[in-house]
């Protein structure tokens, strides 16, 4: 036996209790313990075996930390086969989350009972693999092909009641897993219930697998694991069980050897690591019950919506009663969406809009707020006025936050008498939907204010990333660089449409020009004007064709035209015929002869510019670790999750090749392509970004 599985004999019933916190992952010791426990039960003359998990859950899957290491016997497929083949009646009692290998193990037992709150699922595709312990062969036999394809290709978690309808669970009972499990086993023994191996059930009926494969591949935007899983399920309908298992293994091993698997697992661990900062360990947070939001435009209303949904009470401050009512209308519209999606009920909707939200036009209304976030116009003088007023009315200890996306938080903090209480909380629009929150720590921000920012992020279910102060912080600073790179490629001969298409094929949700249209071209226009007013470096390349679009009133989707024409609706993207002539005129004015770009070169340059700037951001300490950059891009900028983030992508591509490219492009444009010192250092030392992540964790 191992400690990971407890063994007990209660009359005729052997009890195997998983005790491998926090999630009873099926690591080596657990697998050994299960096989030993089963053998012992058989030797002890038990008639049945009950398997359940101690703590918060049944098995939540294979131990992901073991992936990529040398395999250790017994593997999970053998454990599952061994359980299913046992002459004893084997029963699972499930609570918490029976996921991945956990559900596969449950499907290898002969009967399954669960508590009502239990959830089951096969989320392997979200880690870049497919169920590799018989899940693609057993689930379709139990639940049918359609349901199996749905669960396996989306990885979604299914509640116990739905799982019971699908035949995955035989009985639902409230109570402790051990008690309900024992009662169920006794009932089964009393009824002389037979062993019920799923592998002996008839093959499921096939569907049009080629059509499903194509649809799933398209939906995955280049992610291959869901589509590959379709082929594994197909095998369940075409091959006898043993051969189906062999096919599943073959496809599983193919996926294990992909960069996508590495990218997705990096994303899994990084999104958990990103909020864990050593300097915040043990730091008490400040109270967080009532918050104030200043400015009820799209951003402020989104922040207020997220706060209300998390149970905070919100005071919305606007300039006039009319503007306050308009803000309430926006918030209420957002909450209607939550109501429609079943996230809240009508009663909750009314409580949130009528009781938890209050409107104000006088700063005095913020005097009791624990935390105030301003989301007013992005101009330093406006922000300074707001913070001067907040300093005058807010109670001592209140956290004063700015939602600025570019401006200097130190300068804003300096207008108050309490810079230690000032922080940047940079939300992404729409703030009640987008997962990213940049927590911008200024020079004087006190640690408990930072901890409170992270506590707020957790409460709002955001992925919170710590950032230092610089123009654009982590995300917008890097965005500004890769956008500039795209603009340079346009000047030199690429079209916005080719660039968008190449990057969407790389996996981005949207290319940079489609994104610009969505965000509003006026934003970039304002930034360009500000930077020109501050004085551009004479070595920087500039262009004005996009300014002309704005001067003609074309700001993207909101005006119906930008890089694209949205006459037929926001999704029907048709190139705006005015754009290419404007670009041609700009090239002519700058004396540039356009050249061809391949899609590969577009992606390579765009990604290299992103990685180079990201390395500067990490090197300067604006981001603490490479993984902070990766999570920023993943959760705020539509970066394909299956590539892990720009710095994970860079590691997988090879840093020295990337640096060589950057150096060769620096010969044509030394100002833009200045290699990041950190990148040069890593290449010189033969290390990579992941080494830095590991050092930070140790
Ligand atoms: N292996 C190793 N560690 C795991 C793990 C796993 N399968 N699942 C969770 N953990 C770790 C997390 O990394 C985290 O560690 P830290 O505290 O050090 O950060 C800890 O367990 C707690 O996890 P969460 O913070 O996510 O806790 P939660 O309560 O919010 O969520 C959960 C729990 C729903 C189980 C969630 O962790 C989860 O979804 N885990 C992944 C489940 C999964 O994908 N299983 C399939 C694995 S692949 C497989 O099984 C394939 C196969 O057939 C071979």
Image (cartoon, rainbow, N blue to C red):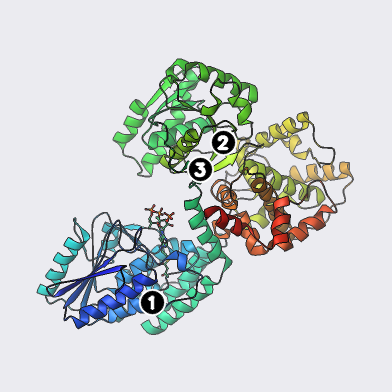
Which quadrant of the view contains residue 218? bottom right
Name the residue nearer the viewer: 635 or 39.
39
CA distance for labels 3 and 2 = 13 Å
Say what secondary structure mark 3 lies in. helix
Q: Which of the two discs, 1 and 2, labels the residue nearer the N terminus?
A: 1
Q: Is residue 536 visible?
A: yes
Q: Is residue 357 above or below residue 97?
A: above
Residue ID for mark 2: 441
Is residue 203 visible from the viewing direction of this image?
no
In x, y percent, where is residue 335?
40, 36
Q: Which mark is residue 77?
A: 1
In the picture as drawn, the residue positioned furthest to the left comes out as 190
> Label 3: how many residues lie within 10 Å, few (<14), some (14-19) or many (20+)?
few
Q: Earlier in the sequence, mark 3 or mark 1?
A: 1
* Residue sitting nearer the eye, 683 or 320: 683
Give the SS element for disc 2: strand
Residue 177 percent across, percent down from the top left = 22, 60
Of mark 3 and mark 2, the one earlier in the sequence is 3
Spatial distance from mark 3 to mark 1, Cα to Cα?
A: 42 Å
Is 572 on the left or on the right of 322, as rendered?
A: right
Q: Disc 3 marks which residue?
A: 279
Report how far apart the C-alphas of labels 1 and 2 lie in the structure.
48 Å
Q: Is mark 1 within 8 Å of ligand 1?
A: no
Front residue (pair 518, 210): 518
At x 64%, y 21%, the residue is 381
Dot 1, crowdedness within 10 Å: few (<14), some or many (≥20)? Answer: some
Q: Are the residues at dot 1 and dot 2 in contact (C-beta closer than 8 Å)?
A: no
Quadrant field for ligand 1: bottom left
Nearer mark to the viewer, of 3 and 2:
3
* On screen, residue 511 above or below 146: above
Image position, residue 353 (x, y; %): 37, 29
């Amino acid at each position: 036996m191992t400690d990971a599985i407890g063994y007990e004999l209660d009359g005729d019933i052997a009890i195997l209790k998983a005790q491998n916190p926090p999630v009873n992952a099926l690591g080596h010791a657990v697998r050994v313990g299960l096989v030993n426990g089963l053998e012992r039960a058989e030797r002890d003359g038990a008639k049945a075996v009950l398997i359940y998990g101690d703590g918060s859950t049944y098995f939540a899957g294979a131990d992901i930390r073991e992936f990529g290491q040398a395999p250790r016997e017994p593997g999970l497929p053998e454990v599952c086969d061994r359980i299913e083949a046992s002459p004893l009646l084997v029963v699972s009692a499930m609570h918490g989350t029976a996921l991945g290998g956990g559900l596969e193990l449950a499907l290898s037992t002969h009967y399954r009972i669960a508590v009502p709150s239990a959830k089951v699922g096969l989320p392997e595709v979200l880690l870049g693999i497919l169920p590799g312990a018989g899940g693609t062969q057993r689930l379709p036999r139990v639940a049918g092909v359609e349901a199996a394809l749905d669960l396996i290709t989306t990885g979604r978690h299914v509640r116990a009641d739905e799982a019971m309808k699908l035949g995955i669970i035989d009985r639902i009972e409230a109570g402790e897993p051990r008690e309900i499990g024992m009662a169920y086993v006794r009932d089964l023994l009393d009824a002389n219930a037979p062993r019920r191996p799923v592998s002996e059930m008839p093959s499921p009926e096939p569907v049009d697998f080629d059509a499903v494969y194509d649809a799933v591949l398209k939906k995955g935007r280049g992610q291959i694991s869901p589509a590959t899983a379709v082929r594994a399920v197909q095998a369940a309908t075409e091959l006898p069980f043993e051969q189906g298992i062999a096919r599943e293994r073959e496809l599983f091993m193919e996926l294990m050897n992909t960069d996508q698997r590495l990218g997705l697992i990096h994303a899994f661990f990084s999104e958990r690591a990103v909020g864990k900062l050593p300097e915040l360990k043990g730091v008490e947070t400040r109270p967080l019950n009532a918050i104030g939001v200043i400015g009820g435009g799209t951003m402020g209303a989104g922040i207020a919506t997220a706060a209300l949904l998390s149970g905070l009470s919100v005071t919305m401050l606007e300039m006039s009663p009319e503007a306050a009512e308009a803000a309430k209308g926006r918030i209420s519209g957002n909450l209607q969406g939550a109501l429609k999606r079943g996230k809240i009920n009508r009663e909750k909707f009314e409580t949130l809009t009528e009781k938890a939200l209050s409107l104000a036009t006088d700063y005095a209304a913020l005097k009791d707020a624990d935390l105030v976030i301003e989301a007013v116009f992005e101009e330093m003088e406006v922000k300074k006025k707001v913070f001067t007023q907040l300093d005058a009315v807010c109670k001592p200890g209140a956290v004063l936050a700015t939602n600025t996306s570019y401006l200097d938080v130190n300068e804003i903090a300096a207008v108050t008498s309490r810079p230690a209480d000032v922080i940047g909380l940079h939300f992404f629009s729409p703030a009640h939907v987008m997962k990213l929150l940049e927590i911008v720590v200024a020079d004087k921000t006190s640690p408990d204010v930072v901890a409170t920012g992270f506590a707020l992020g957790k409460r709002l279910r955001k992925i919170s990333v710590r950032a230092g102060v610089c123009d654009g912080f982590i995300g917008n600073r890097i965005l500004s660089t890769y956008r500039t790179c795209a603009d340079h490629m346009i000047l030199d001969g690429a079209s916005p449409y080719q660039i968008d298409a190449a990057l969407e094929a790389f996996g981005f949700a949207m290319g940079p020009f489609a994104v610009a249209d969505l965000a509003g071209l006026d934003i970039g226009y304002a930034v360009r004007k500000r930077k020109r007013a501050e004085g551009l470096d004479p070595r920087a390349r500039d262009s004005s064709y996009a300014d002309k679009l704005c001067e003609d009133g074309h700001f993207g989707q909101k005006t119906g035209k930008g890089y694209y024409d949205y006459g037929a609706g926001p999704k029907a993207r048709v190139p705006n015929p005015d754009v290419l002539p404007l670009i041609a005129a700009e090239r002519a004015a700058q004396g540039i002869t356009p050249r061809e770009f391949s899609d590969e070169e577009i992606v390579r340059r765009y990604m290299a510019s992103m990685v180079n700037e990201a390395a500067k951001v990490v090197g300067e300490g604006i981001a603490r670790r490479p993984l902070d950059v990766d999570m920023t891009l993943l959760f705020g900028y539509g970066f394909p999750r299956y590539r892990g983030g720009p710095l994970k992508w860079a590691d997988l591509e090879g840093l020295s090749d990337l640096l060589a490219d950057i150096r060769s492009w620096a010969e044509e444009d030394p100002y833009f392509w200045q290699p990041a010192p950190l990148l040069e250092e890593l290449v010189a030392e033969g290390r990579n970004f992941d080494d830095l992540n590991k050092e930070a964790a140790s």
